[in-house]
Image (cartoon, rainbow, N blue to C red):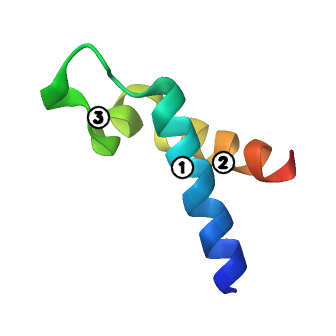
Amino acid sequence: MRMRVLAAFSSIIDLFKRFGFRDNRNKNRLCFLIDAVGMDEMAKAIRRKRRD
């Protein structure tokens, strides 16, 4: 279970680094990224990343 959680967090960090808002420091938060792309798309991206 612990390894699955670590893998999920690693995927989230990677997605945040690639797609986070770098132009606006105030919006450079995970909640804004989720609002922008949607929770379903974030979940799909995490699942895809974990498969790779």
- Residue at 30% across / 44% down in the picture? 31
Mark 3 or 1: in front is 1
Residue at image mark 3: 32
Q: Position of residue 18 (x, y in %)?
A: 53, 27
Q: Residue at x 62, y 50 (%)?
A: 11
CA gap between label 3 and label 2 equals 17 Å
Provide residue 23's location: percent of width, then percent of height.
26, 13
Q: Residues within 10 Å of mark 2 (few under 14, many from 20)?
A: many
Disc 3 + disc 1, Cβ < 8 Å: no
The mark nearer the N terminus, 3 or 1, is 1
What residue occupies the far bottom of the structure in this picture?
1
What is the three-letter code of the residue carrying label 2? Ile
Mark 3 or mark 2: whose residue is earlier in sequence: 3
* Apparent side of residue 9 relative to residue 48 in the rendered image (left or right): left
What kind of element bears circle 2?
A: helix
Point out the tag, 1 or 2, that comes first from the N-terminus.
1
Secondary structure at numbered mark 3: helix
The Cα atoms of the two marked residues, 3 and 1, are separated by 13 Å
Tell me the CA gap for discs 1 and 2: 7 Å
Q: Which residue carries the number 2 mark?
A: 46
Q: Amino acid at mark 3?
A: Phe
Label annotation for residue 12: 1
